[in-house]
Image (cartoon, coloured by chain):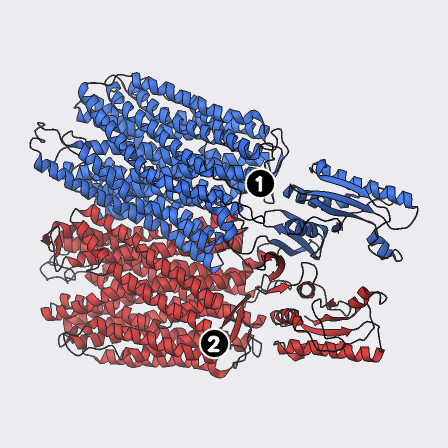
Chain colours: A red, B blue
Amino acid sequence: MDSIIYLVPAFGVVGLLYTAWRFSWVTKQPAGTENMQKLSGYIADGAIAFLKAEWKVLTYFALPTAVLLFWLGSNEGTPENPIHSSPLIAVAFLLGAVFSATAGYIGMKVATKANVRTAEAARTSLAKALKVSFTGGAVMGMGVAGLAVLGLGGLFIIFYQLFAFGQPLTSDKMKKAIEVLAGFSLGAESIALFARVGGGIYTKAADVGADLVGKVEVGIPEDDVRNPATIADNVGDNVGDVAGMGADLFGSYVATILATMVLGQEIEVIDNYGGFSPVLLPMLIAAVGLLASLVSTFLVRINKETDSVQNALNLGNWASIIITFITSYFLVKNILPENLSLRGFDFTSTGVYLAIVVGLVVGALMSIITEYYTAMGKRPVDSIVQKSGTGHATNIIGGLAVGMESTVLPILVLAAGIIFSYKFAGLYGVSIAAAGMMATTAMQMAIDAFGPIADNAGGIAEMSQLPPEVRERTDNLDAVGNTTAATGKGFAIASAALTSLALFAAFVGIAGISAIDIYKADVLAGLFVGGMIPFIFSALAISAVGKAAMEMVNEVRRQFREIPGIMEYEAEPEYEKCVAISTEASLRQMLLPGAIALVVPVLVGFTMGPEVLGGVLAGVTVSGVLMGMFQSNAGGAWDNAKKSFEKGVMIDGQMYYKKSEPHKASVTGDTVGDPFKDTSGPSMNILIKLMSIVSLVIAPYIAVTSGAVVMTETIEVMAENNGSGVEVNKYKLELDNGLKMDISTPGNPVEIGLIDFIRSEKPVDKVTWFDFDRLTFETGSAKLDAASSDQLTNVADILKAFPAVAIKLGGYTDNTGNADNNLKLSVDRAKSVMQSLVAKGVEASRIESEGYGDQHPVASNDTEEGRNQNRRISIRVTEK
Amino acid sequence: MDSIIYLVPAFGVVGLLYTAWRFSWVTKQPAGTENMQKLSGYIADGAIAFLKAEWKVLTYFALPTAVLLFWLGSNEGTPENPIHSSPLIAVAFLLGAVFSATAGYIGMKVATKANVRTAEAARTSLAKALKVSFTGGAVMGMGVAGLAVLGLGGLFIIFYQLFAFGQPLTSDKMKKAIEVLAGFSLGAESIALFARVGGGIYTKAADVGADLVGKVEVGIPEDDVRNPATIADNVGDNVGDVAGMGADLFGSYVATILATMVLGQEIEVIDNYGGFSPVLLPMLIAAVGLLASLVSTFLVRINKETDSVQNALNLGNWASIIITFITSYFLVKNILPENLSLRGFDFTSTGVYLAIVVGLVVGALMSIITEYYTAMGKRPVDSIVQKSGTGHATNIIGGLAVGMESTVLPILVLAAGIIFSYKFAGLYGVSIAAAGMMATTAMQMAIDAFGPIADNAGGIAEMSQLPPEVRERTDNLDAVGNTTAATGKGFAIASAALTSLALFAAFVGIAGISAIDIYKADVLAGLFVGGMIPFIFSALAISAVGKAAMEMVNEVRRQFREIPGIMEYEAEPEYEKCVAISTEASLRQMLLPGAIALVVPVLVGFTMGPEVLGGVLAGVTVSGVLMGMFQSNAGGAWDNAKKSFEKGVMIDGQMYYKKSEPHKASVTGDTVGDPFKDTSGPSMNILIKLMSIVSLVIAPYIAVTSGAVVMTETIEVMAENNGSGVEVNKYKLELDNGLKMDISTPGNPVEIGLIDFIRSEKPVDKVTWFDFDRLTFETGSAKLDAASSDQLTNVADILKAFPAVAIKLGGYTDNTGNADNNLKLSVDRAKSVMQSLVAKGVEASRIESEGYGDQHPVASNDTEEGRNQNRRISIRVTEK
């Protein structure tokens, strides 16, 4: 393997150095008054308390899982059905979990430092406040990307050295190395489950609890320091929107690269990187995207109070995308060879680049569409505002309708993305499109994490009773943050969808199935069950918020009742009790939905087999993407419909403001939307990715135990109309490993004999020869006719598909003419065939050739037909 | 075909005679005071006005569609790819539409007569009121079932006579007869679209409009005669719940029977009904179910005021199911032969019966589960009640969570139903399970239609200011009607799901594809797009209600403003204007969603081909079933959560009644739930069925134009471990028409030669012979070895699969021994093979045999190998 691979972890280190540098910059900023520091200290403590509690639960989950993986990885299968894994997959899993947890930790740390410093900076200028808050986000973004690239790249190098040193990419050893690497992704995605779902429950339970008692019952404003749940509420922003989103994107980022590597491992090419370019490319794109994001962070800045914060963020975002767009071209063109082929689908390096472009376009369109459906002043949000005029119910109906409608364009974009990326580069194209889209994850994450920091800064400003212009500046940042949160969710769900598809394709390959046929009754039943899972998952997540919020409400009520002097600022509420409630409730409530995501694939896979599991995965993905968009967008639209009332809205010719009846209806919508957009909606991402990655990890095991069928050859006979009305039969052979070729007849051509022998249990012997049946030479010469090329290509493809096989070619003639001449001709012809195979990419070392002249006739030399049979080239397997 | 078929339309006539008899009984009941008659007259006029307006729109839609179908049906395809249809499909389509419209007309007529008579009967006793209202429902139910059975059975007989008289079931002529019959189902389902979706918009627009102004703004009770929209509201109950539900079930009923017939047409059997039993069975089951329902209607009665109305209805329902359960057994056992086979899946008549039982069980379980999730006093509705205590938003969240959760059990039941019915009897089993479930449609419909009649009776009692005990009795009936409405919806969605699956299977067969592989990028994209359609359809339906309700609100406000004296009962409101608004708005608003259902399959089918269309259908079905259940159940639960307040509920230790804050929150939920449960939820049924039936009708056309592939043979090689560790290769041949067999080698056995020749364009000649390769005789005898049976079975299967083919068998020997003896032996052996084929079910008239002795050797008789080759039985195709 080429040393270019070392660039990948090196870029990861660059990202982490940037992280450390900017982190220390943030830390050095002034942290405000003592009171501000105390409040931010509470938030930081609460956030760390959640992380610690999460890690504890995680340990209970991760250690048994690691043991299970260790045990599974020790299973080597049978000699006929080897399983390419290793107990080290348990280590990869734990590392994935630790890396993801570390990314979350860095994010929480910087966010809880940046929040108070942003508030302090907002006392001087908007530019300064943006700089601090965005730098906090950038630390998180580069941390996520840096750790992912370092972890994946580093482990890849290690596992390559351990398992497959010196082996070609398509070897079984490499398959093992990459299967073990899948453990890293499983670890990352498992953490994401806890962080995203648990975080989602946490943040909304605290939010709803704080609002219901504080705002509604006691009548104090949001973020009032007297509210016992206000710290928990601010912690929630960090837990849900920083750590949860971070873990989600970290998981998508890793899974996308990994899935592309799993598919790339099947591609045999001759390139300048030892044939490794198909697996190097996704890692290098990630590395390049990381650098592009890093450079672009410096563009996010404003100078004057009146400059647009949104424009500044957009500039950074587009810069990172455009840099990736341009550099990917040179990367692809330099790394990949001109022509590639995966599971019988031929494509070019240009096709791969176009697939990356498809990914970038899909990501950008998804963000734009999401913004349209959730932004203030656009038709969808306005329609909800208008419907608020006739009450709570019509507001809700309006929001639900907007959410449902908002699935149309994204699904069409996604469907087009699938079709085009496949068209350009097959399954590798679908996967690399996802990788292209995820390349700028660092920048996306920076923009996403900036929002909650600004939100927190506003909270601290309010709690510390800073002057109104400070709150105004943080509100400005927060408003932009709300938009970026919505577009970020669009990006996250699109990335999850594409990632799942890539994992889906990888799963199919490893599970050894060649189709997922929903016309089969059990597969269709699987599709139904899979489609149902996002519904029950959402129901559980939403109910969890309700239950946790109730506990919070009771605690807040208790404090107001039992602690005298809170309302008079004389006694401080017991913030930590509320933090503890949110923490415990969220982690407890996410166990059942989490278990569904983890257990269903295992259960279905081992009892019903991989094809039914494929049906379940397809159902989960389709339904999950739809439910995710529906809920996130409805929630976002309700939120901004409510916010529209702050500046006043015109309904039926009359202006309405906050506290009006329509505004109350809009608050109902917003409250319904909260768990939709921050808990169940974004959880769909994790659900579909986690179920896919679990399936991928168990794929080698269910592939073996799923029945007696271990190999399938399909011969398809097509009567094609050749254009002039004559029907010509064409025969296509397709193996379950994806090898595909045209063969001459449905009879017993050399291709089938060769494949059957290679895949059978028969030992290599000296008597089993297969005759070419479509080779012709110029009479008396060793020069192959052009028509022979088809079958030679097939045989070369077979040899490439089975890299362990070595062969011997035998040349034979009939007994007409001089025996010496015959011998020479037979030697030359066998050599000529050998040269042709080498020219088609088979290593010369795998082929020997010999001429036998007129010896070993297979038919009588008395008839022309017999002589014709005797003039032949045969092939014998010498090693397999 | 056997004359038993005439029983089917005869039973339909029996049903219609019952309808006429009970209709006249209802008409003869006393219709109350003049005022009551006037009010019921308004409702009847409004209902008929809607029907007439609907029919007008329908004419604009149906006539061009009929022309299109006429044109499509005139296309006979090419000689190689004949299309088995006829312009008469346009007539079948129009008849389907007319029959469905007639069923709706009968239902509306009787419902608008029974409502006022129920109110009048309620002045005397509950028993009498139940009798009138249920008889009204039974008239509708028997009308729907009678027309369906008469229409389908009658048309089947006519088309058989016209197109396929004397032809066997599996002939192309019969295929044509049944394809034309599919037009009837398309017509019925198209009407259902207008009736269900339009009716759903109508009823909720009127309801919401009446409530928002009447109850909320003006403060008059529901059903107050002063409310201009109250007549429209009562008309809506008939339009939506009677005509809409009726059209929905009529469509499901017809489509299920038809889909089973499409699949049955492919089954070749020898039975006592000329081989027609597989298509007769679904029609006979429907006929038997109709009779069972008819008998059971007489069991629905109570004697005392305190008797349970629910129990009386349950008795009738269960009686009809149990009678069907028992009679189906004898029907299946007597009609079907012991063994059947469809597309390579072998099953028995017992399996078919078990599949019917699966259908009955699935239907019953679906109703029970739906009742659990929507009934008062059960955990789901109670949870919503409790959440109403904390406001509008938590009530909404609770309802949404209940709706989402309510999908779990039904989906598991449905998935198990698919798996088991398939296991018992293949695709025919899935389809017949649906037919079994739908058998008692008449009774289901009677119970469903009873509800809105009782509801209307209550409305008339209120409007006519009848004494309170009358309203009490009608409320009793209405409450039971609400439960039956919910369970009816569960039944309807389950029936739609199973019907769609049956149509899906039928579609696959006719479209000529053998798999729908979601691993293919474009099929997966289709799955996504299909999954999205129920979301946009729901969004449009919900928004339509909102828009229509707004128009209604404005009109009602105008009348209160501009017509003096309404509030003082001095002036009568202009009821007809409100009726007109609901009518026009509902028909206008349903055009876009309707167009989606009709156009998408055509668009996708003709541009992307049948497999992608299959992906779209699967996506629509899965997502549609989920969204249908989610919305219907959430709506039903919200409704009953609100109703729970009438008797008072305990929340957090405190009792709350109507007009309390929690009750207001529950009203919000109910209002949100209204379009969910009565418009968009039930529309999902029509959406998925209509898209499936449109696909089925266009299937022959897209099958031809979808590309050059017209036939596929798959040879699967399986290395099976024979138990003692030795791998044995087994070869399975599968054709795209479902024919499946084990063959000897992947080489060129007689089976492949025969099939290739039959399916090729090659004309029949006298020289193309194929040699049996697995026949052995006892030495010197014509007695076949037992081992020969395998290949003979294969050849017999092939001949059955291609009924037009006739063959000649040739017997040959080597030249050892006496030539005369050789000749005789060859004659006997050929005959022996012929007899064996006849014994395996091939008509003797299709086979001739001849012995050629030692003539026509194919190899040298000098070697043992050559002699062995010369001793053979060959086969030649003489007709195809």
> What mark, if any, has residue A240 been given in the picture?
none
Q: Residue furthest bottom?
A: A3
Q: Position of residue B533 (x, y in %)?
A: 36, 50
The foreground one among B692 and A273 is B692
Q: Give the labeled residue for mark 2.
A: A280
> In 3D space, how far apart are the residues under numbered discs 2 and 1 (Cα atoms)?
57 Å
Tell me the SS state at disc 1. helix
Quadrant (top left, top right, bottom left, bottom right) of the C terminus of chain A: bottom right
Check the image and report above or below for B731 versus A322.
above
- The residue type indicated by label 2 comes to Leu
Compare residues A615 and B149 and report the one nearer the observer. B149
Q: Are marks 2 and 1 on the same chain?
A: no
Residue A719 x/y as whole percent: 60, 56
Looking at the image, which residue is at 69% across and 38% down? B842
Residues under numbered marks 2 and 1 in contact, where contact means CB atoms less than 8 Å apart: no
Q: Is residue B810 left or right of residue A384?
A: right
- B194 vs B721, left or right, is left
Q: Residues within 10 Å of mark 1 (few under 14, many from 20)?
A: many
Q: Secondary structure at mark 2?
A: helix
Amino acid type of the residue that numbered disc 1 sits on in the rendered structure: Asp
